[in-house]
Amino acid sequence: MIQTHGTSMTSAHYSRLGPQECEKIHMASLEILSHIGVDVHDQKALDILVKGGAKADGLRVRIPEYMVARALTTAPKSITLYNRKGQVAMRAGKYNTYYGGGSDCLNILDHRTGLRRRPNINDVKEASTLMDALPEIDFVMSAFLPEDVDQRVYDRYQMEVMLNTTTKPIVFVTPDFEGCVAAIEMCEAVAGSAAAFQKKPFATCYINVTSGLIANAEALQKCMFLAEKGLPLLYIPLNAGGVNSPVTTAGCMASMNAGILLGVVLSQLVNPGTPIAVPGWNGGPYNLQTMVGNYVLPDEQGIPTSMGKYYDIPVFGLGGSTDSKILDQQSGFEATLSLMTSLLHGANIVHDVGFMDSGLQGSLQMIAICNDILGFLRATTAGVVVNDETLALDVIEELGPTGTYLGHDHTVRHFKEPYYSKLIDKNPYSVWQKRGSLSMEARAAKMVDDILAKHKTEPLPADVQQAIHAIVEREQAWINQQS
Protein backbone atom coordinates (compact mmCIF):
# COMPACT_ATOMS: atom_id res chain seq x y z
CA MET A 1 0.00 0.00 0.00
CA ILE A 2 1.46 3.35 -1.07
CA GLN A 3 0.20 6.65 0.26
CA THR A 4 1.07 10.13 -0.93
CA HIS A 5 -0.57 13.43 -0.09
CA GLY A 6 -2.62 11.41 2.39
CA THR A 7 -4.38 9.43 -0.36
CA SER A 8 -4.30 5.63 -0.23
CA MET A 9 -3.16 3.76 -3.30
CA THR A 10 -3.35 0.05 -3.92
CA SER A 11 -0.35 -0.07 -6.26
CA ALA A 12 2.67 -2.00 -5.03
CA HIS A 13 5.82 -0.34 -3.77
CA TYR A 14 9.36 -1.32 -4.70
CA SER A 15 12.43 -2.08 -2.61
CA ARG A 16 16.01 -2.28 -3.82
CA LEU A 17 16.98 -4.44 -0.85
CA GLY A 18 15.22 -7.51 0.46
CA PRO A 19 15.03 -8.39 4.17
CA GLN A 20 18.18 -10.54 3.98
CA GLU A 21 20.25 -7.75 2.39
CA CYS A 22 18.97 -5.23 4.93
CA GLU A 23 19.82 -7.61 7.76
CA LYS A 24 23.37 -8.09 6.46
CA ILE A 25 23.93 -4.32 6.16
CA HIS A 26 22.47 -3.83 9.64
CA MET A 27 24.79 -6.43 11.15
CA ALA A 28 27.77 -4.92 9.35
CA SER A 29 26.83 -1.49 10.72
CA LEU A 30 26.63 -2.92 14.23
CA GLU A 31 30.11 -4.38 13.81
CA ILE A 32 31.44 -1.03 12.59
CA LEU A 33 29.88 0.74 15.57
CA SER A 34 31.05 -1.76 18.20
CA HIS A 35 34.56 -2.59 16.91
CA ILE A 36 35.74 0.23 14.61
CA GLY A 37 33.78 3.15 15.95
CA VAL A 38 32.78 6.62 14.78
CA ASP A 39 34.60 9.90 15.44
CA VAL A 40 32.40 12.20 17.55
CA HIS A 41 33.55 15.83 17.58
CA ASP A 42 31.59 17.17 20.56
CA GLN A 43 32.33 16.62 24.23
CA LYS A 44 28.72 16.80 25.43
CA ALA A 45 27.69 14.18 22.86
CA LEU A 46 30.64 12.00 23.90
CA ASP A 47 29.61 12.22 27.55
CA ILE A 48 25.98 11.32 26.78
CA LEU A 49 27.01 8.34 24.66
CA VAL A 50 29.47 7.05 27.27
CA LYS A 51 26.92 7.46 30.05
CA GLY A 52 24.52 5.42 27.92
CA GLY A 53 27.00 2.55 27.62
CA ALA A 54 29.41 3.44 24.81
CA LYS A 55 33.20 3.35 25.07
CA ALA A 56 35.31 6.36 24.08
CA ASP A 57 38.96 6.56 23.09
CA GLY A 58 39.53 10.22 22.43
CA LEU A 59 37.10 11.19 19.67
CA ARG A 60 36.49 7.59 18.68
CA VAL A 61 33.28 6.15 20.13
CA ARG A 62 32.27 2.49 20.04
CA ILE A 63 28.62 1.69 20.59
CA PRO A 64 27.45 -1.79 21.63
CA GLU A 65 24.54 -3.51 19.91
CA TYR A 66 22.15 -3.24 22.85
CA MET A 67 22.28 0.57 22.71
CA VAL A 68 21.19 0.51 19.07
CA ALA A 69 18.41 -1.99 19.78
CA ARG A 70 17.15 0.12 22.66
CA ALA A 71 17.14 3.32 20.59
CA LEU A 72 15.25 1.70 17.74
CA THR A 73 12.44 0.75 20.13
CA THR A 74 11.81 4.38 21.15
CA ALA A 75 12.39 6.17 17.83
CA PRO A 76 8.90 7.03 16.46
CA LYS A 77 7.66 5.45 13.25
CA SER A 78 6.50 8.79 11.83
CA ILE A 79 6.99 12.53 11.96
CA THR A 80 3.93 14.77 12.01
CA LEU A 81 4.36 18.30 10.72
CA TYR A 82 1.68 20.96 10.79
CA ASN A 83 1.03 24.05 8.76
CA ARG A 84 1.28 27.50 10.25
CA LYS A 85 -2.46 27.38 11.13
CA GLY A 86 -2.01 24.31 13.33
CA GLN A 87 -3.54 21.80 10.92
CA VAL A 88 -1.85 18.47 10.17
CA ALA A 89 -0.03 18.84 6.84
CA MET A 90 2.31 15.83 6.73
CA ARG A 91 2.22 12.45 8.42
CA ALA A 92 5.65 11.30 7.29
CA GLY A 93 5.95 7.58 7.88
CA LYS A 94 5.25 4.20 6.28
CA TYR A 95 4.55 4.90 2.59
CA ASN A 96 3.26 8.44 2.93
CA THR A 97 5.33 10.56 0.53
CA TYR A 98 5.57 14.37 0.54
CA TYR A 99 7.61 16.64 -1.72
CA GLY A 100 9.30 20.02 -1.37
CA GLY A 101 12.12 22.18 -2.65
CA GLY A 102 15.75 22.30 -1.63
CA SER A 103 18.02 24.90 -0.04
CA ASP A 104 21.04 27.10 -0.66
CA CYS A 105 21.64 26.89 -4.41
CA LEU A 106 24.50 29.21 -5.34
CA ASN A 107 22.93 30.05 -8.72
CA ILE A 108 19.49 30.54 -10.21
CA LEU A 109 18.39 29.81 -13.76
CA ASP A 110 16.35 32.99 -14.16
CA HIS A 111 12.96 32.16 -15.69
CA ARG A 112 12.61 35.71 -17.01
CA THR A 113 15.88 35.84 -18.95
CA GLY A 114 16.91 32.20 -19.32
CA LEU A 115 20.32 33.14 -17.91
CA ARG A 116 22.22 31.79 -14.93
CA ARG A 117 22.99 34.34 -12.23
CA ARG A 118 23.65 34.73 -8.51
CA PRO A 119 20.49 34.75 -6.37
CA ASN A 120 19.31 37.39 -3.93
CA ILE A 121 16.87 37.44 -1.03
CA ASN A 122 13.97 38.26 -3.36
CA ASP A 123 14.62 34.98 -5.18
CA VAL A 124 14.14 33.18 -1.85
CA LYS A 125 10.86 35.05 -1.43
CA GLU A 126 9.68 34.15 -4.94
CA ALA A 127 10.66 30.50 -4.51
CA SER A 128 8.81 30.29 -1.20
CA THR A 129 5.75 31.97 -2.71
CA LEU A 130 5.77 29.58 -5.66
CA MET A 131 6.07 26.49 -3.46
CA ASP A 132 3.32 27.81 -1.21
CA ALA A 133 1.02 28.09 -4.24
CA LEU A 134 1.76 24.82 -6.07
CA PRO A 135 -0.69 22.08 -5.04
CA GLU A 136 1.69 19.12 -5.39
CA ILE A 137 4.44 20.73 -3.28
CA ASP A 138 3.92 19.86 0.37
CA PHE A 139 6.70 21.74 2.16
CA VAL A 140 9.01 24.69 1.58
CA MET A 141 12.77 25.13 1.65
CA SER A 142 14.79 28.26 0.92
CA ALA A 143 15.92 27.18 -2.59
CA PHE A 144 18.69 29.77 -2.86
CA LEU A 145 21.61 31.19 -0.91
CA PRO A 146 21.12 34.98 -1.28
CA GLU A 147 24.27 36.97 -1.92
CA ASP A 148 22.80 40.36 -0.93
CA VAL A 149 22.71 39.55 2.80
CA ASP A 150 25.54 38.89 5.25
CA GLN A 151 26.84 35.44 4.30
CA ARG A 152 27.68 34.65 7.91
CA VAL A 153 24.00 34.74 8.91
CA TYR A 154 22.24 34.28 5.56
CA ASP A 155 20.10 31.47 6.96
CA ARG A 156 18.43 33.83 9.45
CA TYR A 157 17.24 36.01 6.56
CA GLN A 158 16.03 32.93 4.69
CA MET A 159 14.00 31.78 7.69
CA GLU A 160 12.38 35.17 8.12
CA VAL A 161 11.33 35.19 4.46
CA MET A 162 9.92 31.64 4.56
CA LEU A 163 7.91 32.25 7.72
CA ASN A 164 6.37 35.32 6.10
CA THR A 165 5.62 33.80 2.69
CA THR A 166 4.29 30.29 3.32
CA THR A 167 1.82 28.56 5.58
CA LYS A 168 3.16 25.13 4.59
CA PRO A 169 5.68 23.19 6.71
CA ILE A 170 9.28 24.39 6.42
CA VAL A 171 12.51 22.39 6.28
CA PHE A 172 15.41 24.67 7.13
CA VAL A 173 19.19 24.37 6.97
CA THR A 174 21.70 26.35 9.01
CA PRO A 175 25.50 26.46 8.63
CA ASP A 176 26.07 26.71 12.38
CA PHE A 177 24.45 25.66 15.64
CA GLU A 178 23.50 29.22 16.55
CA GLY A 179 21.45 29.49 13.36
CA CYS A 180 19.41 26.44 14.36
CA VAL A 181 18.68 27.99 17.75
CA ALA A 182 17.64 31.27 16.11
CA ALA A 183 15.37 29.49 13.60
CA ILE A 184 13.58 27.60 16.37
CA GLU A 185 13.21 30.84 18.32
CA MET A 186 11.52 32.43 15.29
CA CYS A 187 9.17 29.45 14.99
CA GLU A 188 8.29 29.70 18.66
CA ALA A 189 7.48 33.39 18.16
CA VAL A 190 5.10 32.44 15.32
CA ALA A 191 3.51 29.63 17.36
CA GLY A 192 3.11 31.84 20.42
CA SER A 193 5.37 29.87 22.76
CA ALA A 194 7.94 27.10 22.90
CA ALA A 195 5.29 24.71 24.21
CA ALA A 196 2.90 25.54 21.38
CA PHE A 197 5.56 24.92 18.75
CA GLN A 198 6.62 21.65 20.40
CA LYS A 199 2.99 20.49 20.37
CA LYS A 200 2.42 21.35 16.70
CA PRO A 201 5.77 21.83 14.94
CA PHE A 202 5.55 23.37 11.47
CA ALA A 203 9.30 23.34 10.77
CA THR A 204 12.16 20.88 11.09
CA CYS A 205 15.92 21.08 10.68
CA TYR A 206 17.88 19.23 8.01
CA ILE A 207 21.11 18.35 9.85
CA ASN A 208 24.09 17.81 7.56
CA VAL A 209 26.55 15.32 9.07
CA THR A 210 30.09 15.08 7.67
CA SER A 211 29.89 11.36 6.85
CA GLY A 212 28.90 8.01 8.25
CA LEU A 213 32.10 7.69 10.27
CA ILE A 214 32.59 11.36 11.23
CA ALA A 215 30.00 13.26 13.28
CA ASN A 216 30.83 16.97 13.26
CA ALA A 217 30.24 19.20 16.27
CA GLU A 218 27.53 21.40 14.72
CA ALA A 219 25.44 18.40 13.66
CA LEU A 220 25.69 16.79 17.09
CA GLN A 221 24.81 20.05 18.84
CA LYS A 222 21.71 20.52 16.66
CA CYS A 223 20.65 16.92 17.26
CA MET A 224 20.90 17.28 21.04
CA PHE A 225 19.26 20.71 21.10
CA LEU A 226 16.24 19.60 19.08
CA ALA A 227 15.93 16.35 21.02
CA GLU A 228 15.97 18.26 24.31
CA LYS A 229 13.03 20.29 23.02
CA GLY A 230 11.22 17.18 21.74
CA LEU A 231 11.24 18.53 18.20
CA PRO A 232 11.54 16.44 15.02
CA LEU A 233 14.92 16.37 13.30
CA LEU A 234 16.41 15.08 10.07
CA TYR A 235 19.80 13.50 10.84
CA ILE A 236 21.60 13.01 7.54
CA PRO A 237 25.14 11.54 7.29
CA LEU A 238 26.11 11.01 3.65
CA ASN A 239 28.91 8.94 2.14
CA ALA A 240 30.65 9.15 -1.22
CA GLY A 241 31.47 5.58 -2.25
CA GLY A 242 35.11 5.32 -3.33
CA VAL A 243 36.05 8.64 -1.69
CA ASN A 244 35.32 8.42 2.05
CA SER A 245 33.92 4.89 2.14
CA PRO A 246 34.09 1.66 0.11
CA VAL A 247 33.12 2.05 -3.54
CA THR A 248 30.79 -0.93 -3.39
CA THR A 249 27.18 -0.07 -2.61
CA ALA A 250 26.98 -2.51 0.31
CA GLY A 251 30.19 -1.23 1.93
CA CYS A 252 29.27 2.41 1.37
CA MET A 253 25.81 1.88 2.84
CA ALA A 254 27.03 -0.14 5.82
CA SER A 255 29.48 2.58 6.91
CA MET A 256 26.95 5.36 6.25
CA ASN A 257 24.34 3.43 8.20
CA ALA A 258 26.66 3.22 11.19
CA GLY A 259 26.63 7.01 11.42
CA ILE A 260 22.87 7.09 10.94
CA LEU A 261 22.40 4.69 13.84
CA LEU A 262 24.70 6.82 16.01
CA GLY A 263 22.34 9.76 15.44
CA VAL A 264 19.34 7.62 16.35
CA VAL A 265 21.08 6.46 19.52
CA LEU A 266 22.11 9.98 20.56
CA SER A 267 18.67 11.49 19.96
CA GLN A 268 16.95 8.75 21.96
CA LEU A 269 19.45 9.00 24.82
CA VAL A 270 18.77 12.72 25.09
CA ASN A 271 15.01 12.32 24.89
CA PRO A 272 13.39 8.94 24.20
CA GLY A 273 10.66 9.33 21.62
CA THR A 274 12.31 12.19 19.72
CA PRO A 275 11.07 12.00 16.10
CA ILE A 276 14.02 11.48 13.75
CA ALA A 277 14.30 10.90 10.00
CA VAL A 278 17.19 9.17 8.24
CA PRO A 279 18.66 9.65 4.72
CA GLY A 280 17.02 8.35 1.56
CA TRP A 281 19.84 9.03 -0.89
CA ASN A 282 23.59 8.47 -1.33
CA GLY A 283 24.85 5.21 0.14
CA GLY A 284 26.36 4.21 -3.20
CA PRO A 285 29.35 4.84 -5.47
CA TYR A 286 30.42 8.40 -6.20
CA ASN A 287 30.85 9.52 -9.81
CA LEU A 288 34.56 8.69 -10.10
CA GLN A 289 34.59 9.70 -13.78
CA THR A 290 33.92 13.37 -13.05
CA MET A 291 34.55 13.58 -9.26
CA VAL A 292 31.39 15.68 -9.08
CA GLY A 293 28.75 15.11 -6.43
CA ASN A 294 25.84 14.25 -8.71
CA TYR A 295 22.26 14.32 -7.49
CA VAL A 296 20.76 11.62 -9.73
CA LEU A 297 22.76 8.40 -9.94
CA PRO A 298 21.15 5.01 -10.63
CA ASP A 299 23.16 2.81 -8.27
CA GLU A 300 22.12 4.56 -5.08
CA GLN A 301 18.39 4.83 -5.86
CA GLY A 302 16.35 3.38 -3.01
CA ILE A 303 19.27 1.84 -1.10
CA PRO A 304 19.17 3.99 2.07
CA THR A 305 15.37 4.22 1.83
CA SER A 306 15.24 0.41 2.04
CA MET A 307 17.19 0.61 5.30
CA GLY A 308 14.86 3.26 6.65
CA LYS A 309 11.93 0.97 5.88
CA TYR A 310 13.78 -1.92 7.54
CA TYR A 311 13.97 0.15 10.74
CA ASP A 312 10.47 1.61 10.23
CA ILE A 313 11.86 5.13 10.67
CA PRO A 314 10.85 8.13 8.51
CA VAL A 315 13.05 8.74 5.47
CA PHE A 316 14.24 12.14 4.21
CA GLY A 317 14.56 11.53 0.49
CA LEU A 318 15.58 13.33 -2.68
CA GLY A 319 13.73 13.75 -5.98
CA GLY A 320 12.82 16.17 -8.74
CA SER A 321 16.47 17.03 -9.32
CA THR A 322 18.78 16.93 -12.32
CA ASP A 323 22.46 17.33 -13.04
CA SER A 324 21.62 19.14 -16.28
CA LYS A 325 22.44 22.84 -16.51
CA ILE A 326 19.46 23.74 -18.69
CA LEU A 327 15.85 22.68 -19.07
CA ASP A 328 16.32 19.94 -21.62
CA GLN A 329 15.63 16.25 -22.18
CA GLN A 330 18.13 15.27 -19.48
CA SER A 331 16.43 17.48 -16.90
CA GLY A 332 13.02 15.97 -17.66
CA PHE A 333 14.42 12.44 -17.67
CA GLU A 334 16.26 12.74 -14.35
CA ALA A 335 13.60 14.75 -12.55
CA THR A 336 10.84 12.32 -13.50
CA LEU A 337 12.80 9.19 -12.61
CA SER A 338 14.00 10.57 -9.27
CA LEU A 339 10.45 11.62 -8.36
CA MET A 340 9.12 8.20 -9.37
CA THR A 341 11.75 6.15 -7.55
CA SER A 342 11.36 8.17 -4.35
CA LEU A 343 7.62 7.51 -4.51
CA LEU A 344 7.90 3.79 -5.24
CA HIS A 345 10.63 3.24 -2.65
CA GLY A 346 8.52 5.04 -0.04
CA ALA A 347 10.72 8.01 0.97
CA ASN A 348 8.61 10.21 3.22
CA ILE A 349 9.93 13.79 3.07
CA VAL A 350 11.42 14.23 -0.40
CA HIS A 351 13.40 17.42 -0.94
CA ASP A 352 15.44 19.15 -3.67
CA VAL A 353 12.61 19.48 -6.19
CA GLY A 354 13.89 21.99 -8.76
CA PHE A 355 17.61 21.43 -8.16
CA MET A 356 19.97 21.42 -11.15
CA ASP A 357 23.71 21.16 -11.87
CA SER A 358 24.66 18.96 -8.91
CA GLY A 359 22.79 21.21 -6.51
CA LEU A 360 24.66 24.35 -7.60
CA GLN A 361 21.67 25.79 -9.47
CA GLY A 362 17.95 26.06 -8.86
CA SER A 363 15.07 26.88 -11.16
CA LEU A 364 11.54 28.10 -10.45
CA GLN A 365 10.50 26.72 -13.85
CA MET A 366 11.86 23.32 -12.84
CA ILE A 367 9.81 23.41 -9.64
CA ALA A 368 6.69 24.21 -11.67
CA ILE A 369 7.44 21.40 -14.14
CA CYS A 370 8.03 18.94 -11.29
CA ASN A 371 4.71 19.98 -9.75
CA ASP A 372 3.07 18.82 -12.99
CA ILE A 373 5.08 15.59 -13.04
CA LEU A 374 4.02 14.91 -9.45
CA GLY A 375 0.38 15.38 -10.31
CA PHE A 376 0.77 12.84 -13.09
CA LEU A 377 2.64 10.37 -10.85
CA ARG A 378 0.12 10.63 -8.05
CA ALA A 379 -2.69 10.00 -10.52
CA THR A 380 -0.73 7.13 -12.09
CA THR A 381 -0.28 5.35 -8.76
CA ALA A 382 -3.67 6.16 -7.27
CA GLY A 383 -5.96 3.35 -6.25
CA VAL A 384 -9.15 2.84 -8.24
CA VAL A 385 -12.47 3.10 -6.42
CA VAL A 386 -14.65 0.16 -7.44
CA ASN A 387 -18.24 0.26 -6.14
CA ASP A 388 -21.79 0.49 -7.47
CA GLU A 389 -21.45 4.18 -8.25
CA THR A 390 -18.21 3.85 -10.20
CA LEU A 391 -19.16 0.62 -11.97
CA ALA A 392 -22.25 2.49 -13.17
CA LEU A 393 -24.12 -0.63 -14.35
CA ASP A 394 -27.40 1.27 -14.07
CA VAL A 395 -26.07 3.93 -16.44
CA ILE A 396 -24.85 1.31 -18.90
CA GLU A 397 -28.24 -0.41 -18.77
CA GLU A 398 -30.02 2.91 -19.32
CA LEU A 399 -27.91 4.12 -22.26
CA GLY A 400 -26.66 0.88 -23.76
CA PRO A 401 -24.15 0.74 -26.63
CA THR A 402 -25.49 3.73 -28.59
CA GLY A 403 -26.47 6.19 -25.87
CA THR A 404 -24.78 9.54 -25.28
CA TYR A 405 -22.85 9.44 -22.03
CA LEU A 406 -21.45 12.96 -22.36
CA GLY A 407 -24.45 14.80 -20.89
CA HIS A 408 -25.57 12.17 -18.40
CA ASP A 409 -25.81 13.08 -14.70
CA HIS A 410 -23.24 10.40 -13.87
CA THR A 411 -20.69 12.05 -16.16
CA VAL A 412 -21.47 15.47 -14.67
CA ARG A 413 -20.85 14.06 -11.18
CA HIS A 414 -17.48 12.54 -12.02
CA PHE A 415 -15.89 14.32 -14.96
CA LYS A 416 -13.68 16.51 -12.77
CA GLU A 417 -12.06 13.54 -11.01
CA PRO A 418 -9.33 12.64 -13.57
CA TYR A 419 -6.02 14.49 -13.45
CA TYR A 420 -5.77 17.30 -15.98
CA SER A 421 -2.37 18.92 -16.33
CA LYS A 422 -2.13 22.70 -16.19
CA LEU A 423 1.24 22.71 -17.94
CA ILE A 424 1.44 19.80 -20.38
CA ASP A 425 -0.09 20.57 -23.79
CA LYS A 426 -2.62 17.96 -24.96
CA ASN A 427 -4.27 20.02 -27.68
CA PRO A 428 -4.22 19.43 -31.45
CA TYR A 429 -1.34 21.00 -33.36
CA SER A 430 -3.56 23.80 -34.68
CA VAL A 431 -4.62 24.85 -31.18
CA TRP A 432 -1.04 24.69 -29.86
CA GLN A 433 0.07 26.84 -32.81
CA LYS A 434 -2.75 29.34 -32.27
CA ARG A 435 -1.69 29.75 -28.64
CA GLY A 436 1.83 30.76 -29.60
CA SER A 437 3.61 27.44 -30.24
CA LEU A 438 5.08 27.61 -26.74
CA SER A 439 7.49 25.00 -25.41
CA MET A 440 6.96 23.53 -21.96
CA GLU A 441 9.85 25.67 -20.74
CA ALA A 442 8.04 28.81 -21.92
CA ARG A 443 4.72 27.67 -20.46
CA ALA A 444 6.42 27.01 -17.13
CA ALA A 445 7.92 30.51 -17.11
CA LYS A 446 4.47 31.98 -17.72
CA MET A 447 2.98 29.85 -14.96
CA VAL A 448 5.63 31.07 -12.52
CA ASP A 449 5.00 34.72 -13.44
CA ASP A 450 1.23 34.27 -13.10
CA ILE A 451 1.60 32.71 -9.64
CA LEU A 452 4.02 35.38 -8.43
CA ALA A 453 1.67 38.10 -9.63
CA LYS A 454 -1.49 36.64 -8.08
CA HIS A 455 -0.67 34.40 -5.13
CA LYS A 456 -0.89 36.02 -1.71
CA THR A 457 0.03 34.21 1.49
CA GLU A 458 -1.92 34.96 4.63
CA PRO A 459 0.37 37.41 6.46
CA LEU A 460 1.63 36.94 9.98
CA PRO A 461 0.36 39.41 12.58
CA ALA A 462 2.40 42.61 12.60
CA ASP A 463 3.76 42.01 16.11
CA VAL A 464 4.94 38.52 15.12
CA GLN A 465 6.66 39.89 12.02
CA GLN A 466 8.41 42.42 14.25
CA ALA A 467 9.46 39.73 16.72
CA ILE A 468 10.96 37.59 13.95
CA HIS A 469 12.77 40.55 12.45
CA ALA A 470 14.14 41.49 15.88
CA ILE A 471 15.73 38.03 16.13
CA VAL A 472 17.36 38.51 12.71
CA GLU A 473 18.67 41.92 13.75
CA ARG A 474 20.01 40.47 17.00
CA GLU A 475 21.81 37.73 15.09
CA GLN A 476 23.29 40.29 12.71
CA ALA A 477 24.54 42.37 15.62
CA TRP A 478 25.97 39.25 17.29
CA ILE A 479 27.91 38.15 14.24
CA ASN A 480 29.25 41.67 13.75
CA GLN A 481 30.68 41.54 17.26
CA GLN A 482 32.51 38.30 16.44
CA SER A 483 34.64 39.94 13.75
Image (tube, rainbow, N blue to C red):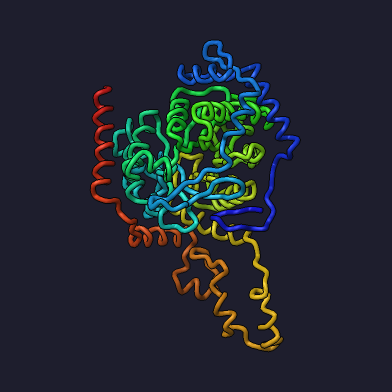
Q: Residue 24: percent from the left, percent from the top?
A: 73, 30
Residue under the image location 46 percent in, 17 percent down:
43
Of the pair 330 and 468, the residue shown nearer to us: 468
Residue under the image location 59 percent in, 62 percent down:
379
Of the pair 216 and 105, the residue shown nearer to us: 216
Which quadrant, please, contains the C terminus? top left
Can you see residue 179?
Answer: yes
The answer to whether residue 421 is above or below residue 230 is below
Residue under the image location 35 percent in, 46 percent down:
163
Q: Residue 93: percent from the left, percent from the top?
A: 58, 45
Residue 450 is left or right of residue 387, and the answer is left
Residue projecting furthest to the right: 20
- Using the rendered view, name the quadrant where residue 50 is placed: top right
Of the pair 431 and 304, the residue shown nearer to us: 304
The answer to whether residue 456 is above or below residue 343 is below
Of the pair 133 and 65, the residue shown nearer to us: 65
Residue projecting furthest to the top: 57
The answer to whether residue 458 is above or below residue 73 is below
